[in-house]
Image (cartoon, rainbow, N blue to C red):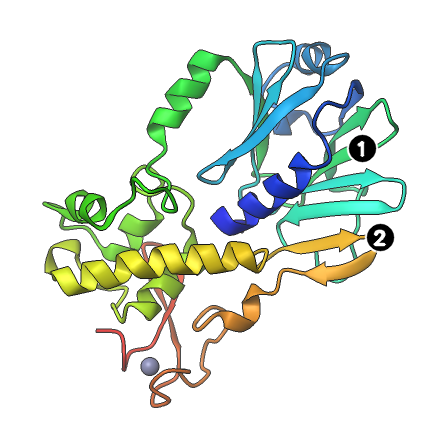
């Protein structure tokens, strides 16, 4: 599932490719992916162009130039965005595997640009969506999304205040998008590992040192993952595969039953917390 670093990466890549191009056609192959009527969606887009694309949490926002509307895209579990111009391909979102396939049976939306380039939306499990929204709806959605963890506003003090008077479990708290935006299963488990905090802990049991350490871990892991272009991310330029390289740096993700890299005593254990597969080291996470 694409998390903040993967979404940030595809947004940055698309920024260089899809803006200011006249949209000549829109194909909606799976109606339920687009939450507007196909007519409205097509009529609004065709003839217009995208003027801005940005990320907020795990949401992607694409502003139209003429219409006072923004498209919101959420990739959820398996959404992928793939841009193609001649032999150049830029892709991101859910991991594609080694073979990049597009315009296949999992392609649900196609945006055709006047310069013959195309933007495809693929989604195997079809939990993702596209929706045209007004600026009011946009503000409403923005209000529901928590703080950006890489922003300056997300300080140690802010984080500490966010935890105060809460008794919930640390893992479910970090996954909750209304508190902190963009963290998902992979980066929550990694941040807890780095700060040596057990995923079973309750918020009101964390001391200042642990809060500081966790705050630092969240910022560090996300920044590093963006630098490496994400974990579940593949990017293909001129059809030469160039995978997101972060996997090698991860300490618990996909390391079930493998020896902990830090203490080298215990194996990484996989349990279920907050309904999610959770990996941690029972020896060095307290
Ligand atoms: Zn360990």
Give x and y (percent) for residue 269: 37, 76
Figure quadrant of residue 185: bottom left
Number of other residues with Cα within 10 Å of mark 2, as a class: few under 14, some 14 to 19, many 20 or more: few
* 116 sits left or right of 65 in the view: right
Q: Which SS class for mark 2? A: loop
Element at label 1? strand
Q: Dividing the image into four equal quarters, which quarter contains ligand 1?
A: bottom left
Vertical placement of residue 196 versus 226, above or below: below
Tell me the number on the disc at residue 40.
Answer: none
Kindly tell me whether residue 276 is visible in this rendering.
no
User: Which residue bears the numbered disc 2?
Assistant: 238
For mark 1, does the 10 Å Cα neighbourhood hold few (<14), some (14 to 19), or many (20 or more) residues? many
Nearest the viewer among 38 and 187 is: 187
Residue 280 visible in the shown view: yes
In which quarter of the view is residue 18 placed? top right
Q: Describe residue 124's horizontal placement relative to residue 161 as left or right.
A: right
Q: Earlier in the sequence, mark 1 or mark 2?
A: 1
Q: CA distance from mark 1 to mark 2?
A: 15 Å
Q: Position of residue 168 (x, y in %)?
A: 19, 50
Please state which of the two labelled residues, at mark 1 or mark 2, is closer to the viewer: 2
Which of the numbered marks, if any, corresponds to residue 118? 1
Q: x%, y% of residue 262?
A: 37, 82
**Residue found 76% across the figure and 14% down from its top:** 46
When the figure is inspected, residue 129 is found, relative to residue 243, above or below; the finding is: above
Nearer-the-camera pick, 256 or 9: 9
Q: Residue 19 at what x, y percent from top left?
A: 70, 27
Q: Is residue 7 left or right of residue 17?
A: left
Looking at the image, which residue is at 44% across and 16% down? 137
Q: Quadrant of residue 248?
A: bottom right
**Where does the C terminus fall, quadrant-wise?**
bottom left
Question: Is residue 275 found left or right of 210 in the rendered image?
Answer: right
């Amino acid at each position: 599932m694409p998390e903040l670093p993967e979404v940030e990466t595809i947004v940055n890549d698309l920024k260089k490719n899809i803006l200011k191009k006249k949209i000549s056609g829109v194909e909606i192959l799976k109606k339920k992916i687009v939450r507007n009527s196909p007519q409205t969606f097509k009529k609004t887009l065709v003839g217009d162009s995208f003027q801005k694309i940005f990320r907020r949490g795990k949401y992607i926002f694409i502003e139209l130039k003429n219409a006072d509307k923004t498209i919101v895209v959420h990739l959820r579990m398996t959404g992928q965005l793939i841009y193609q111009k001649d032999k150049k391909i830029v892709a991101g979102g859910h991991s594609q595997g080694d073979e990049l396939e597009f315009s296949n049976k999992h392609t649900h939306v196609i945006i055709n640009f006047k310069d013959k380039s195309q933007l495809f939306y693929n989604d195997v499990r079809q939990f993702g969506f596209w929706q045209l929204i007004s600026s009011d709806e946009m503000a409403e959605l923005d209000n529901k999304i928590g703080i950006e963890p890489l922003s300056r506003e997300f300080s140690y003090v802010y984080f500490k205040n966010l935890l105060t008077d809460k008794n919930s479990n640390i893992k479910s708290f970090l996954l909750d998008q209304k508190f902190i935006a963009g963290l998902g299963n992979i980066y929550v488990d990694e941040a807890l590992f780095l700060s040596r905090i057990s995923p079973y802990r309750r918020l009101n049991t964390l001391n200042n040192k642990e809060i500081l350490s966790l705050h630092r871990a969240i910022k560090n892991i996300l920044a590093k993952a963006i630098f490496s272009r994400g974990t579940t991310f593949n990017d293909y330029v001129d059809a030469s595969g160039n995978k997101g390289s972060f996997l090698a740096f991860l300490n618990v993700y996909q390391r079930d039953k493998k020896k902990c890299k830090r203490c080298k005593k215990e194996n990484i254990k996989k349990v279920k917390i907050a309904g999610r597969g959770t990996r941690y080291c029972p020896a060095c996470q307290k």
